[in-house]
Amino acid sequence: MRVYLFLVLSICLAAAAATPDYQPPFNVMANGAQIELSVGHANPLITDWNGDGLKDLILGQYSSGKLRYYENNDTNDSPMFGNYTFMQADGVDISLSSG
Ligand SMILES: [Ca+2]
């Protein structure tokens, strides 16, 4: 019986893992406007950066290598971002080279 249950659970977990549920694409807004970058490449990261329980947005800019920080001012289900600040280390904007 345990072998049978294990086999059924394994099949269910494999089926669930094989069918991700993606949402339709959408434009991310900040301060009421679509986020624009000077060059079309960006590396987004969603994480609770400031530890307030709300997921924030960090965007790595391809053109200058700077990291934009957008704090989430609403909820995790309906995030609202305002103006960004550049992330800094020791008072200096962080800049990562490309390549
Ligand atoms: Ca946060």
Image (tube, rainbow, N blue to C red):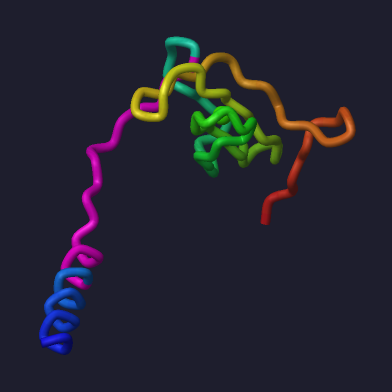
Tell me if residue 17 is in the magenta stretch. Answer: yes
- Is residue 56 toward the left or the right of residue 66 in the image? left
Residue 46 versus residue 95: which sits nearer the camera? 46
**Percent x, y for residue 53?**
52, 31
- Is residue 87 toward the left or the right of residue 20 in the image? right
Residue 82 versus residue 2: which sits nearer the camera? 2
User: In this view, which residue lies farthest toward the top?
Assistant: 32
Query: Please, is residue 4 above or below residue 17 in the view?
Result: below
- To which quarter of the image does residue 94 belong? top right
Residue extent of the magenta highlight: 14-30
User: In this view, which residue lies farthest toward the front?
Assistant: 1
**Percent x, y for residue 27?**
36, 27
**Percent x, y for residue 28?**
40, 26
Residue 45 versus residue 42: which sits nearer the camera? 45
Q: Quadrant of the N terminus?
A: bottom left
**Percent x, y for residue 30?**
48, 18
Tell me if residue 80 is in the magenta stretch. Answer: no
Q: Quadrant of ligand 1?
A: top right
Q: Quadrant of the C terminus?
A: bottom right
Query: Please, is residue 22 above or below residue 82 in the view?
Result: below
Residue at 35% x, 23% y is: 78
- Is residue 13 toward the left or the right of residue 74 in the image? left
- To which quarter of the image does residue 47 belong? top right
Residue at 67% x, 35% y is: 67
